Amino acid sequence: MSESWPPLDTHAHIEPEIDPTELLALRAAIFAATRTLEEFETTRGRADPITVWGVGVHPKVPAAFETFSIESFERSISRSPLVSEVGLDRSSSVPMSTQAHVLAQILRALRGRPRIVSMHSVGATAEVLDLIEEHAPVGVVLHWWKGTETQTARAVELGCRFSINRADLRHPAVIGRVPADRILTETDYPHGSGRRAAPGDVETIEEALAEHDRSTRGQVRRTI
């Protein structure tokens, strides 16, 4: 496989204090998801060559909502092409009404500022799709998607992409249901990648995609 194409991990949780040399040693392009605007601020001043730090307001983290302001969010996205991780989660202790209100503000702010947006939707796939349809953001990537076949078709119509990890391979809701060029690889490190995996370790997913498409890992990686 050509060394010019590193593996791409579009969703991994990495401590912002990590030494840059440790990230380079992974030999992968990584989209790092933060959980709060304050956590994203701690990445200020980093100059990681192939790691992108995302602006996050994680729906399962109460502190992300307690300190959220749309002004702070807009300042943060002026410094990053990535919004990660945001969304809705029905199992969160944060009221759904609060989550939906904040997510709507975020999506409105992105109307004129296109970004890659890694979107969480646990237990709230229909609600997330409704907000995407209402606000029409560009660049949504549905992370660890568990929607029905009908909802998946709707997401495709809305222009969404989908990022899948190893756990998704056991209960596929994306492969075979969406165009191959809408699928991206992720680890959701450390949650969806297995005990021994590291950020950027997406080879198993590339192999599954290649087998499904009767392709090769190299071709899959180039498509991604």
Image (cartoon, rainbow, N blue to C red):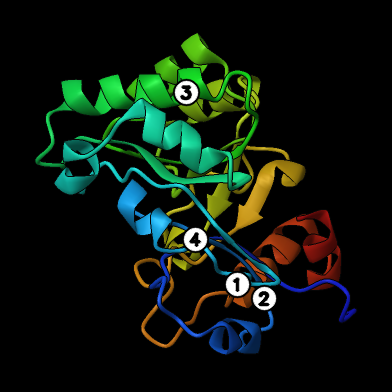
Question: Can you identify the residue that label 3 sits on?
Answer: 107
Q: Which mark is first along the chain, 4 or 3?
A: 4
Distance CA(mark 2)–CA(mark 3): 29 Å
Residue pictured at 37% horizontal, 72% vertical? 190
Q: Residues within 10 Å of mark 4 (few under 14, many from 20)?
A: few
Element at label 4: loop
Numbered disc in front, either 3 or 1: 3
The reply to whether dot 2 and dot 1 touch (C-beta < 8 Å) is yes
Q: Amino acid at mark 3?
A: Leu
Question: Can you identify the residue that label 1 sits on?
Answer: 202
Q: Judge whether residue 24 can be spotted in this image.
A: yes
Q: Which mark is first along the chain, 4 or 2?
A: 2
Locate residue 26 relative to residue 165 in the image: left or right. Answer: right
The reply to whether dot 1 and dot 4 touch (C-beta < 8 Å) is no
Q: Amino acid at mark 2?
A: Ala
Q: Judge whether residue 36 can be spotted in this image.
A: no
Residue 106 - label: none
Locate residue 179 relative to residue 164 in the image: left or right. Answer: right
Question: Can you identify the residue that label 4 sits on?
Answer: 44
Q: Which mark is first along the chain, 4 or 1?
A: 4
In the depicted view, which residue is nearer to us: 8 or 33? 33
Question: From what the image shows, is residue 110 above or below residue 196?
Answer: above
Residue 167 x %, y %:
42, 64
